[in-house]
Each structure stands twice: as structure tokens, then as C-alpha cells.
Image (tube, rainbow, N blue to C red):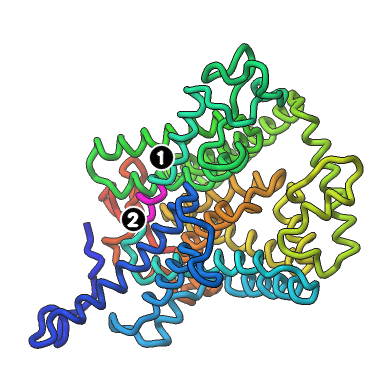
Amino acid sequence: MASEHTGIAHGPGTAHGPGTAHAPGRAYALRQLVPLIAVFVVLVDAATDFFPDDPLTGVLTPTRLAVVAGLVALVLPGGGQGWAQRVRNFRTRLDVPVAVLLLAALTTTFLGGHPTAPLRGLLTVVACYYLVVGLRRTQPESWRAIGLLALAGIAAAGTAAFSQFTNGTPTGFCRTGLLTDVSCDGGGTGTGAGSGDVLIRTIGTFANPNLLAAFLVLLLPFALLAAVSLDERTARTAVVLVAVVGYGALLTTFSRAGYVAGAAGLLVLGGAYWLAPRLADRAQRRLVTVLGFGFLVGAAALISFVSRAGNSLGVRGQAWNAALDVAVSNPLGVGLGRSGAVISATAPGERTFVHAHNMWLNWLVETGPLGLLGIVSVTVVAWYSAGRAARAKSVVGTIGLASLTGFFLMGMMDHPANLDRIETLFWFVLAVVMAEAPTGWRGTTGHSAVSTTSTASRPRQPRHGLPQHGSATPGAPVPAQR
């Protein structure tokens, strides 16, 4: 396993120099350790809501304190990098779309006179994004730690969900399969499968099943990253077992959108990581892609056709129509976090909505066309960059493509990122993807974690895949994206 100290020369003032033997070593260790601890705090809180939301002082919560400390450690002098290089470590292709999103959020918040708490939440997740980007750029070996931390989050949420299902723990959500939502009162809490045909929908460490499904859809592909970081067979088997628990927990949510999104992620993961290297030409790969897309469309149509769960598709239609009416009347947006209340007041009937049930439409309602432009740009650039990295056989790119594909599919029918923990995880995935991609768009222009990483510290090519660029070694390094 490659050392994270690769490329750091020993000289006067290092641990091998006289006089000042220990201080620089400790400073270097601090710069290495603090950002990783901050990412640990972010992921653990996203998975379990472990840390309190109440601020320690002012607006500084424990999670925000960790993020600030991590960012400060990343920009500290040292490690042979000047200020210009340390700034370049944070540059990504999403910088302009992120700036557009923040401008839209600032405009609607201050011109509309809305509360600033949602804006602080957005600034927090953007700071988390740059924290992860900086960590990946300055510590190329951190992909191993990220994979293991993601696995811990899957284990925490997945085992909690299975415990609810097998022990018949009431969650307040029940369903008869995929067909009809039913009340959990009157016998739905007797066994793991409920009583009779009533099935308990698990929520794990979240407030409802759809949020748990979104969490698992985003994080489950990262189990592959944990698997390729281990050389020992039994350890890799344990990782696979945790992933099986995670996918099983996804099934116990009985989330129709989650099922389709999870299947999409698996198809992308399997196709790009295992199947694509075995296909002889581009025509075969296109055929498999079309067949996979057709399978997803057919599965979604079948689920929609047989479902009678509260006429949910019709309810979503009401939310979408009301959201469009609100967007036309409010070109600057109604303010971050206010879409649910405004849509509920506009839509016919007495049903209460929390959001617009579509990620991009919700941004349009809350921040206007400028915000819509920002989130659409984020979507396109991130998905394109992940696809390019996956095409270059990057393991991290393949994982990001699978994760984002599933989540974007869920975002068409729901808006799980309305919850700050899911939003944090979404921006975490974006950061992992964009740190892998070059900053520029032409050739090799720009800075990327892949292009500046020693070959020993990149995720390896799968042992069962074809070697790249004539390498005879099954575990050859993944080639850098260009």
C-alpha cells in the first residue's frame, strides 16, 4: 500500500533534520489528519444524525466547526506548496455553477427578506464540497478512507433498517407490497412483515422510507471503493456482505423510486466496471446501454401502472402544476426552504406538501430561473465528468456515475436533498467526482487528483477486467482521465 507521504522530500527541518525534528512533523500530521477527521464527522452525521444541530456558539454547530477546521488545515502553509498551488487544489469544473447557485440563493434571501438559516445550510454543504475536493487533491490515498467511511455509513443505516423490519418495530409507514399505502394501526406492527399483507416500511436512521432509500442509493456504490482498497479475500467478502445488507435495507423501504434508482445504479456499476471491459466494440456497448435503459423504463412503467399507493403520481402532478404557477408569479423565487408551504397554499385541496417533488423544479420555485440554471449546470457537468472518468476506466468515476445516476432518477419524482443530511451527502458525492476530473475542458488543461497522483495510490483496475494500455498486470492502475 502506497504511503501518503509519497513525493515529500526529507530535508532540514523535517523529522530527519537536526534541531527542529518534531515540530514540522507534527504540523504535517495535523494537515493530514484534521481534514480526514472533518470528513469523518460529516459522513457520520449524514448517516446517523449523530451530532447535535444546536450551535455551540452563534451559528457554529459541531459539524460546521469540523468543516471549518478541515478547510483551515488544508490551506495551512507547508508541504512544499505555495499559496497559488493550495488555491488550485480547490478548483473544479463546478466552480461557476456553484457560484450561480449561491448568487441565486443570496438574491432570493436578501431581496425577498427571507430567513437566513437555509442560506447558512447551503453555504455549509458547499463548504463540505470543497473540503472533500481539497482532501482528495492533497491526499490522493484518501480514496481508501472515503470508501471505508462510506461503508460504515451503509452499515449504520442498513442494520438499523433491518432491525426495524425483522423486529416489527413501528415506523409509522406501512404498505401492502408496492401497491397501496395503508395505516399501520390495527395489526401492522406484529411481525417483521407486519400482520397479514401489511408490510412495515423501514426508515433506518431517517424520518421516512424515501429518505433512507435516497441515502442508500447515493452511498451503496461506494462499497466498491471499499472493496478495491482491500487485498485480502476475507476482508473483501466482509465488504460485500455489508453491501448486501445495504441493498436489502433498500428493499425494505418499499420505495418505488428507490427501487428504480437502485437498479439504475447497479446497472451502471456492473456495466461500466465489469461488463464494458469485456465488450469487443462500441456497437456492443451501445446495445447493452440501450437494453439497460429500456429495462429501467419498463420497470418504472410497470411499477407506476400497478401502484395504487395513495394516487401518488396524481398528487405529484398537483405539486408540479402548482410549482410552475408559483415559479411564474415569483421570478426571484419564494426563498430557500419555503417551496412546500407556498405550493401547499396554491395547490387545490388540503394536502400538505414539503417540497415540489422534483429537485430541479424545487430550485426553480425557491430561487427562480437563475437557481434553475445553476442546478441544471451542476447536474450536467457532474454527470458528464463522471461519465468521462468511467469511460477512462476510473473506479472512482464509475462509482460516482452510478451514484449520481440513481440519485438524479429519484430527483425526478422526489426531492430527498430537501433534508440537509441528504443534501450534504449529495455534495459529498459531487466532490468525489469533481476532484477526479480535470479543472479545464480542453485536453489535459487544469488540475486533477488523478493526474497528479502517483500510480501506486490510484484505485486499481479490477482483477477480472481487461488490463489497460497493454499492461499485463490484472491489478494495473486505472489510467488518468484526459
**Looking at numbered disc 1 in the image, what kind of residue is underneath it?**
Ala
What residue is disc 2 on? 145
Q: Residue at x 72, y 23 (%)?
A: 180
Q: Nearer the viewer, mark 2 or mark 1?
A: 1
Mark toward the start of the polypeptide (2 vs 1): 2
Of helix, strand and loop, which one carries label 1? helix
Q: Main secondary structure of the magenta part?
A: helix
- Circles 2 and 1 in contact, beta carbons < 8 Å: no
Q: Amino acid at mark 2?
A: Ala
Query: In this picture, which residue range is highlighted in magenta?
Result: 146-150
Which residue is at 9% across, 88% downward? Answer: 19
Task: Check the image and report above or below for 233 versus 2.
Answer: above
The residue that disc 1 covers is 155
- Tell whether position 144 is magenta: no
Most extreme residue toward the left, as rendered? 18
Name the residue at 42% across, 41% down. 156
- Numbered disc 2: secondary structure: helix
Q: Is residue 174 visible?
A: yes
Q: Is residue 288 visible?
A: no
**Residue found at the far top of this picture:** 196
Number of marks in picture: 2
Which picture quadrant has residue 59?
A: bottom right
Residue 40: x and y in percent read: 39, 57
At which x and y percent is residue 362?
75, 56
Q: Which residue lies at the image location 22% right of the left edge and 64% below the top edge? A: 3
The quarter of the picture where residue 367 lies is: bottom right
In the picture, measured across the screen, residue 335 lies left or right of residue 40, that is: right
